[in-house]
Image (spheres, rainbow, N blue to C red):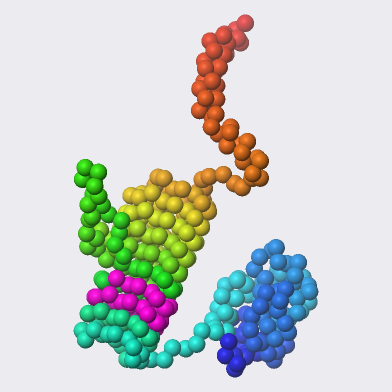
């Protein structure tokens, strides 16, 4: 963090739209948890399970709702959503060094490429023919920007990001190290047991305000483009196959795998380790819980799960043994129901008796 990053609580309250209850002149140099914060740090309470730390915190100020502040005697910044206020405050204490505009001497830039004068192109970057780098873009060391690819204004690519040819990136997009966009999709035709490769001639289109995590891969389309909507947030190590479409403001946690040509709606939340088969559609506002395997389309908003919850190993072994017998048990139950029906008189006959 830069040494001169200091705010008064009064200044922070103004920037965050908070109501200050306490001394406005208190200096704040950073952020910390309730347990670890010191007198010169700002903290927040956004999860009830951490309420137990509120009374003993040493924080110079705490972001709280009005209801929570009733139980706290210390300095508070009153907001409707403490976690959102914390998110905004975090940018005030950003530690990332600023990038200087210009092209590093070791970068390789094709003559036909266009690089805005305000962009920062780091060491070892390669920019191929007819690529376009917009204003304020930062390309970290050893990024690769393929032919005809475009990056919109104020994008930031961490070191070692790879964009193949014909990848279109919107404005204010953040891509973390190791991500690969526009790699060839997994497309093969089988000829008498031998796999024949299908050329992937589509591209990738990424909207505005998207964030893509480290080592995440987004394959190019087979015919049409793979599309990532505005405001989408992708965690680390996610696989997006060819021709997938993801709607605006959908978020995915780590290790999600989306098979080809699946369409996911807007404002969905996909938890860690979820898998989706190809050629299905997920409607808007769907939440899929962790490790779920989605094998069919989802047409109604809501929460969806599959699999079983964690058990002790001994309980799981017993459950697994019973699962193997379920089909046999179901058949036996059907046979018993038929036999019972054969010897049980109808309900109307029983009432007449």
Say if 106 sits above or below 48 in the image: below
> Residue 255: percent from the left, percent from the top?
47, 59
Residue 212 visible in this rendered orientation of the protein: no
Q: Identify which residue is drawn at 49% across, 61% down.
A: 254
Residue 274 visible in this rendered orientation of the protein: yes
Q: Which quarter of the figure is the C terminus placed in? A: top right
> Residue 130: percent from the left, percent from the top?
22, 80
> Residue 189: percent from the left, percent from the top?
23, 49
Q: Which quarter of the figure is the N terminus placed in? A: bottom right
Q: Secondary structure of the magenta portion, mostly?
A: loop
Q: Which residues are magenta?
A: 135-164
Say if 118 sits above or below 125 in the image: below
Say if 236 sits above or below 124 in the image: above
Decide which of 250, 244 is in the foreground and name it: 244
**Image quadrant where residue 131 sits:** bottom left
Q: Identify which residue is drawn at 22% across, 62% down.
A: 201
> Residue 211: percent from the left, percent from the top?
44, 71
Q: Identify which residue is drawn at 26% across, 71% down.
A: 165
Decide which of 37, 284 is in the foreground and name it: 37
**Image quadrant where residue 15 sits:** bottom right
Q: Relative to residue 220, is residue 77 drawn left or right? A: right
Extreme-top residue of the structure? 353
Q: Relative to residue 334, is residue 315 drawn left or right? A: right
**Image quadrant where residue 210 sits:** bottom left
């Amino acid at each position: 963090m830069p040494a001169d990053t200091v705010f008064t609580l009064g200044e922070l309250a103004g920037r965050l739209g908070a109501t200050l209850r306490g001394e406005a002149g208190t200096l704040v140099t950073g952020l910390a948890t309730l347990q670890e914060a010191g007198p010169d740090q700002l903290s927040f309470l956004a999860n009830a399970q951490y309420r137990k730390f509120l009374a003993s915190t040493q924080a110079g100020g705490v972001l709280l709702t009005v209801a929570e502040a009733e139980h706290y005697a210390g300095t508070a910044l009153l907001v409707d959503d403490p976690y959102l206020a914390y998110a905004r405050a975090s940018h005030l204490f950003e530690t990332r060094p600023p990038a200087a505009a210009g092209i590093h001497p070791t970068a390789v830039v094709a003559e036909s490429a266009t690089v805005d004068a305000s962009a920062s192109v780091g060491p070892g970057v390669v920019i191929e023919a007819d690529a376009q780098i917009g204003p304020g873009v930062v390309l970290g060391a050893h990024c690769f920007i393929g032919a005809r690819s475009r990056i919109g204004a104020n994008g930031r690519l961490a070191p070692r990001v790879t964009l193949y040819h014909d990848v279109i990136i919107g404005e204010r997009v953040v891509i973390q190290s190791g991500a690969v966009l526009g790699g060839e999709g997994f497309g093969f035709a089988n000829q008498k047991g031998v796999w024949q490769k299908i050329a992937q001639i589509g591209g990738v289109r990424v909207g505005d305000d998207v964030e893509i995590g480290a080592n995440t891969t987004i394959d190019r389309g087979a015919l049409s483009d793979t599309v990532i909507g505005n405001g989408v947030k992708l965690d680390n190590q996610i696989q997006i196959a060819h021709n997938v479409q993801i709607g605006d403001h959908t978020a995915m946690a780590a290790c999600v795998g989306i098979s080809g040509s699946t369409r996911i709606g807007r404002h969905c939340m996909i938890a860690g380790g979820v898998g989706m088969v190809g050629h299905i559609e997920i409607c808007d506002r769907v939440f899929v819980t962790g490790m779920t395997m989605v094998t069919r389309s989802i047409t109604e908003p809501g929460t969806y799960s599959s699999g079983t919850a964690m058990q002790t190993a001994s309980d799981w072994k017993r459950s697994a043994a019973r699962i193997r017998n379920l089909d046999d048990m179901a058949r036996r139950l059907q046979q018993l129901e038929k036999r019972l029906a054969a010897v049980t008189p109808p309900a109307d006959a029983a009432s007449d008796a």
